[in-house]
């Protein structure tokens, strides 16, 4: 469950017609194309990776093309990873609608780019992990099969993910910390009101139960 955001609703009325339907399908397709191209020709991924030095030399496409870097160089793992990305993205779009999902991803991209230009480091890993956390918040009891065998609910995977983030924040340098904070900031921006209203509802329910007992 999520609550309506008045600001997003106003934006949707003005710009909703520009929303890209099935956005994650295009992102995943781009990752798959780059993976196959790199597999056959080699060195392709390095042409799309984020690099402030090369951007300053005129390779401006690197500001955005890093979002299409595939998450693995393993043929077996990439199939599972891209399917999982598509599942998460399409589920979020189905729950939110295309415009809200576009905004979530766009804000994450812009935050990642800003952090990259500031620190010199940008990756789509933490951006896509913010999608994972958003999915876990909306569908905590959704089950996935770890290693295609072990059934695990998303909420437990999300907790492990947060533990990993904490470890990365402690052991990583400041470029990693900034990238982490940006991805978590996107979650807070889109779910912060949900948490506050959810806590208020629980307090009201607890108060109602206490009043009934009296």
Image (tube, rainbow, N blue to C red):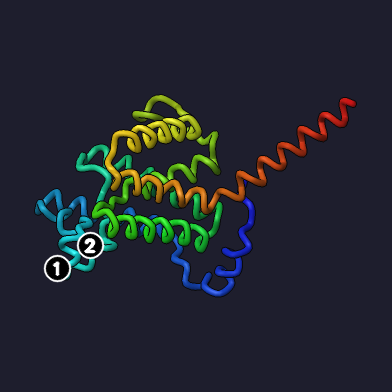
Quarter of the image for residue 64 reads bottom left
The answer for how far apart the CA atoms under marks 2 and 1 are is 11 Å
Residue receiving disc 1: 57
Residue at 29 percent of width and 47 percent of height: 175
Name above or below for residue 116 compared with residue 79: below
Q: Which residue does the image show at 43% across and 43% down from the upper left?
A: 132
Residue 150, quarter of the rendered image: top left
Badge number at residue 62: 2
Which numbered marker is on residue 24?
none
Please identify, in this view, whether the residue under mark 2 or under mark 1 is nearer the observer: 1
Can residue 87 be seen here? The reply is no
Report the front residue among 203 and 87.
Answer: 203
In the rendered image, residue 122, in percent from the top left (x then y), is placed at: 28, 53
| Percent coordinates x, y for residue 166 in the rendering | 39, 34
Could you say which is closer to the camera, residue 177 or residue 18?
Answer: 177
Query: Quadrant location of residue 74?
Result: top left
Q: Secondary structure at mark 2?
A: helix
In which quadrant is the C terminus drawn? top right
Contact (CB < 8 A) between labels 2 and 1? no
Horizontal placement of 197 versus 192: left or right?
right
Query: Which residue is at a point 50% across and 33% down the rendered structure image?
Result: 155
């Amino acid at each position: 469950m999520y609550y309506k955001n008045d600001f997003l609703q106003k934006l949707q009325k003005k710009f909703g017609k520009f929303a890209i339907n099935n956005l994650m399908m295009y992102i995943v397709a781009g990752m798959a194309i780059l993976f196959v191209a790199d597999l056959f020709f080699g060195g392709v991924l390095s042409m799309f990776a984020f690099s402030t030095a090369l951007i300053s030399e005129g390779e401006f496409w690197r500001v955005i093309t890093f979002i299409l870097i595939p998450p693995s160089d393993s043929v077996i793992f990439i199939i599972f990873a891209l399917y999982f990305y598509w599942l998460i993205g399409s589920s979020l779009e189905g729950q939110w609608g295309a415009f809200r999902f576009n905004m979530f991803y766009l804000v994450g991209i812009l935050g990642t780019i800003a952090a990259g230009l500031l620190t010199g480091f940008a990756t789509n890993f933490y951006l896509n992990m913010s999608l994972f956390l958003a999915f876990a918040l909306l569908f905590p009891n959704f089950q996935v099969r770890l290693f295609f065998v072990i059934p695990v609910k998303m909420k437990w995977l999300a907790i492990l993910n947060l533990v990993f983030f904490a470890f990365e924040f402690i052991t990583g340098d400041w470029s990693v910390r900034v990238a982490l904070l940006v991805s978590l900031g996107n979650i807070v921006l889109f779910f912060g009101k949900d948490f506050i209203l959810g806590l208020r509802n629980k307090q009201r329910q607890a108060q109602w139960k206490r009043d009934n007992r009296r």
